[in-house]
Image (spheres, rainbow, N blue to C red):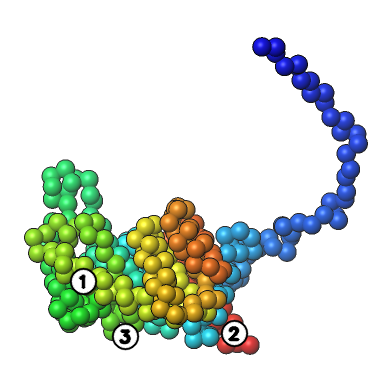
Amino acid sequence: MDRPPKRTFPPLDFSKITTTSVGKREHKVHTGLFGRALDPSEGGDVLDTMPDLLGAATLRRLAARIAQAVRDGAPVVVGFGGHVIKTGLAPLLIDLMERGVVHALATNGSGAIHDYEIAAVGHSSEDVGPGLEQGRWGMVHETADALNESARRARDEGRGLGETLGGWMNERELPNRQLSLLATAARLDIPVTVHVALGTDTVHMHDNASGAAIGEASMNDFRRLASIVATLSGGVYLNIGSAVVLPEVFVKALNVARNLGADVSNFCTANLDMLRHYRPRVNVLERPGGEAFELTGHHEINVPLLRWAVLRELAAEEGR
């Protein structure tokens, strides 16, 4: 077989390139978008120091959408994973609940566990390694009793796990219940749902765990979340710190709502997490439709900034 002829690549003649003026070219960045080096002694707002670009621009736009939803009476729903509790953000979300900015909560089993432990004893987040080596990780009886008893009670009363556990904490007047998202939701009569994947939580390792009770209680919560999502038009859904469970639950709840005839449109979704994951991207940001926001970074930085930006948007509207 004959070899093909050798190809040659003579250098291109750059002298014939057409150029234009940088002053006439369209740009994505200009000095009007730059941050400002304000001095703290001047009493300025840290948001005013941030450039209006990339993540900072996303933060501002998301805050504006949340504020608009509040003004329009549309729901703002916060889905959160356990790390939101473990990074100390409960007081900020509770403040938004009490101000009428957050209208419903959804979490996974981890979120419920850490929320309960903060309310009960003021600390949480066990060091897994040493306990796992001895088979003692997650073997505290108080947390298992609270979660598993609440699951049975929710099943027997036809209620969800979130509502039941939050009420359980208030009934027993746990010492730090004012820092509990679930207890606060029960006190304010705000819907709170817990979505459990069996076998993923430490309380499932205990003898008093009933798969039937946990499943039925969590299923009741799924039905309730679907009814909340059915009203999401014009509102906002925030997924904060859940990479798998809540994105999957949310997209199914949305599908059920639409299947039953709800016109869920003109809402926006946002994902806030340390990393960018596949399921939040497709199930929270892409598939639902509408405007979508992604803020990647530490919860303990982004959530306080977002709260502040929302409150500033609302205050500015009241001042006009």
Q: Earlier in the sequence, mark 3 or mark 2?
A: 3
Q: Secondary structure at mark 2?
A: helix
Which label sits on residue 95? none
Which label sits on residue 189? 3
Q: Which residue is mark 1?
A: 216
Nearer the camera: disc 1 or disc 2: 1
Percent x, y for residue 38? 63, 65
Percent x, y for residue 199? 21, 56
Disc 1 to disc 3, how far (Cα)? 22 Å
Q: Nearer the viewer, residue 140 or 11?
A: 11
Q: Earlier in the sequence, mark 1 or mark 2?
A: 1
Crowd tier of the residue under label 3, counting other residues whose Cα lies within 10 Å: few below 14, some 14–19, many 20 or above? few
Quadrant of the image occupied by residue 219? bottom left
Residue 275, relative to residue 88: is it above or below? above
For the C terminus, give its image quadrant: bottom right
Q: Who's the residue at 14% across and 56% down the image? A: 205
Residue furthest right as drawn: 16
Left or right, 33 with respect to 315, comes to: right
Q: Nearer the viewer, residue 105 or 216?
A: 216
Q: Who's the residue at 39% across and 73% down the image? A: 256
Which label sits on residue 317? 2
Disc 1 to disc 2, how far (Cα)? 44 Å
Nearer the camera: disc 3 or disc 2: 3
Q: Earlier in the sequence, mark 1 or mark 3?
A: 3
Crowd tier of the residue under label 2, counting other residues whose Cα lies within 10 Å: few below 14, some 14–19, many 20 or above? few
Q: Is residue 173 visible?
A: no
Percent x, y for residue 208? 9, 64
Q: Secondary structure at mark 1?
A: helix
